[in-house]
Amino acid sequence: MSDFPTPYNDSSLDGQVALVTGATSGLGLRFATVLAKAGAKVALTGRRVERLADLEKKIREDGGECASFRLDMTDMDNVVGVVGEVEEALGTPTILINNAGIPDAQYAHKMSQELIDDVFDTNLRGPYVLSCEVARRLIAAKLPGRMVNISSVGGFNYGGGGAALYSITKAGIARMSEVLAVEWAKFNINVNCVAPGAFDSEMMDGMVSRIGEFYKHTPRGRLCNPAQLDSTILYLCAPASECVTGTIIKVDDGQGAR
């Protein structure tokens, strides 16, 4: 007989500390709210710190615990240093959501070096450095951990339109998840990846303003709501997914199918 209840679906995050990047809007804001609701103490991070105050208020009014931290994913000193700030304020981060990302919105041959650097740093280099810093502290404290990296269906299928580097970096995030899962499995640190399709967000608003309502030509002709990612994010952070690591879950409403 199993010692686990039937069904085993433990989604409580009580006692966990979650660090969410890009929590100022869109998917990141939703992820932070969901993790706080599930019991985690949440470190809200982003460049636009004035926006985090409203989110802090909302989470606390809903009975959650959180704190805000400025984080610029292109500043590697900031990326490393924020982990210590979170640890001092809330405790060692045991959950990391690498959500922050920016589009390139330029054809590859027209991109400035500055934009290239910003996209690489925000979408790939920063998340890698942050993951390593969180893992370093988890390993030192002998704590298990969960990391969820946000890729995109655009990292697997590219239809053109001036987002080549975005596609490249999001493919890199997916591969990063797979290899770090192998490297850190012996330390009980799970690393997984979610690849969303077109979800309603501030970034998506910018894309639609540039290229039109492209999503109307997808199988279901719609943008998904960020709430429809709740169950996937919560599952990958929760005790019930202990054996899931190195996995990429596409939540794309059929938009990326070929």
Image (tube, rainbow, N blue to C red):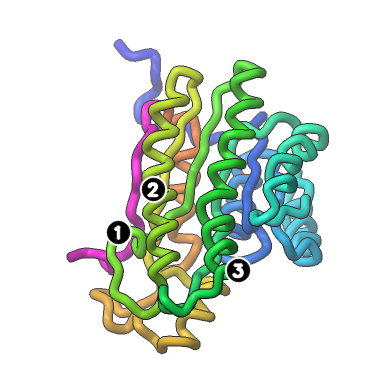
Residue occupied by mark 3: 114
Write the start and end of the magenta stretch as one range: 243-258
Residue occupied by mark 2: 174
Quadrant of residue 18 within the rendered picture: top right
Tag 3's secondary structure?
helix
Label annotation for residue 171: none
Quadrant of residue 216 within the rendered picture: bottom left
Front disc: 3 or 1? 3
Q: Amino acid at mark 2?
A: Ala
Q: Amino acid at mark 3?
A: Glu
Q: Name the residue: 65% across, 18% down.
A: 140
Q: Residue 167 at x, y = what percent?
A: 38, 63
Q: CA distance from mark 3 to mark 1?
A: 25 Å
Tag 1's secondary structure?
loop
Residue occupied by mark 1: 156
Q: Residue 20 at x, y = what percent?
A: 63, 49
Dot 3: few (<14), some (14–19), or many (≥20) neighbours within 10 Å?
few
